[in-house]
Amino acid sequence: MAEMSSALLDQDIKEQLSQYLQMAEGDVLIKVSADSGQVSGDMLALLEEIASLSPRVAIEKTKLSRTPSFSIQSAATAGGDGRITFAGIPLGHEFTSLVLALLQVSGRAPKVDQNVIDQIKAIKGEYRFETYVSLSCHICPDIVQALNMMSVLNPGITHTMVDGGVFREEAEAKNILAVPVVYLNGEFFHSGRISVEEVIAKLGGGPDVSQLAAKEPFDTLIIGGGPAGVSAAIYAARKGIRTGLVAERLGGQVQETLGIENFISIKYTEGPTVAANLEEHLREYQIDVIKAQRCRRLEKKDLIEIELENGSVLRSKAVILATGARWRNICVPGEAEFKTKGVAYCPHCDGPIFKGKRVAVIGGGNSGIEAAIDLAGITEHVTVLEFMPELKADLVLQQRLDSLPNVTVLKNVQTKEITGTDRVDGLTYIDRATGEEHHIDLAGVFILIGLVPNTDWLDGAVERNRFGEILVDSRGATNVPGVFAAGDCTNSHYKQIIIAMGSGASAALAAFDHLIRN
């Protein structure tokens, strides 16, 4: 479904939405809680336009716990309360969440594995979820859609999406300065990306450990679900060998990337779109996908053993490590303490929360300078701090940054501490040339200083360099026979999506060659 702008439905979107609503399998009732405000007026206008596109959608005014908001429910249960609520107007990245909610409430089956559906239905208890989002956040829809789906499938679960821009005082009262943030039964539950399988696991559900341990040995087992891992799995499966893939979540670090303009043959796309396409392509093959699982140990025996954190052990003749990388921390006082309380790593997701405020960006590479440029259009002022004497970003980005009137660049400085009480209120840095300390008053700090490989669990198992990257040869082979690696977790010089995909394919072909020769 195309994303919505902040405007109401244009003709192209109306036509597209009308086609989607034809797939509704039952009547849907939208209960609206509105007042005389502008947001309520826009919300009502949007819902009336949607209702005009399908005879299966009706609107009824009511009073909900938040205004403006609306709930969606089957018309067959009109006397009760809807288990899916949108507090605010789900436009932007959340418009797809609204469309999917309408279809699923109407009776349209969600596109998810049957074993996941069974796990959701088996959850016992009452769970009232609330997810705080910003409409510019490209990560938020994943969790909104997951919790909406769980609410449709399990009568003990409800979910409310809360637009932090509309309910700003409520979000600030809970010190929510990064999104998405999920509350469960009034208590903090999770911040950041999380898959439906991970939610199920946190609620005590998920796949049976004995079922995982009982799996027959694989010919090739891939660890990681990003571009490198998915590429390796597809190339392996196409060889007709028994292939498995273990991942905490599919998509990997690409999920954190918004605009992608260097994915050859595609002029422009976005990270979540690439991630969704990866999963769709993966499902075309006979690949045993094991999600929401983290690995704890690799050991080479007659077969290669991979122990998961839940204690089960998977075995394979060959293994491809494609665990990717995560944002690097600066490891100064205040960073961990104020994460989601002013310390952030995604300007696209969390930038709108700091509208009209003063923020800092730590990091002078491409990611940092791109973030500073984006934030300058939202915030009152941006201060960029770079450890080295010169910025490392591309010259075109530096020139664009220099043209902005509300940006200050500090070079050759070291961040000493991020300060605050219950949220960030500033940052202390050291001028490396003079040794003098300085303090800046700030509402938020965005940290973008590169990536660190997800290889901590491989201590002593395979050879790594001082940065933790797995050492591989030109075919992706490690120092352990039968163990290969690909993507951002390796000592590849360049961390790019297209390079990760290529290295995943190379590793899979090398693993197959290893199998037929041994």
Image (spheres, rainbow, N blue to C red):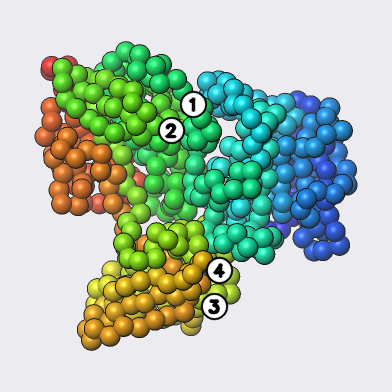
Residue at 32% x, 47% y is 325
Assign a secondary structure to mark 4: helix
Sequence-first tag of 3 and 2: 2
Assign a secondary structure to mark 1: loop
Residue 113: horizontal and vertical position, in percent?
53, 23
What kind of residue is marked 2?
Ala
Image quadrant in which the C terminus is located: top left
Q: Do the residues labelled 3 and 4 touch (CB within 8 Å)?
A: no
Reading the image, the residue beneath label 2 is: 292
Mark number displayed over residue 354: 4
Q: Is residue 359 visible?
A: no
Q: How many other residues sit within 10 Å of disc 2, few (<14), some (14-19) or many (≥20)? A: some
Reading the image, the residue beneath label 3 is: 380
Mark number displayed over residue 206: 1
CA gap between label 1 and label 3 equals: 45 Å
Residue 148: horizontal and vertical position, in percent?
65, 37
Q: Are marks 1 and 2 in contact (CB under 8 Å)?
A: yes
Residue 452: horizontal and vertical position, in percent?
28, 52
CA gap between label 4 and label 1 equals: 37 Å
In the picture provided, is 481 more to the left or to the right than 323?
left
Assign a secondary structure to mark 2: loop
Q: How many other residues sit within 10 Å of disc 3, few (<14), some (14-19) or many (≥20)? A: some
CA gap between label 1 and label 2 equals: 9 Å
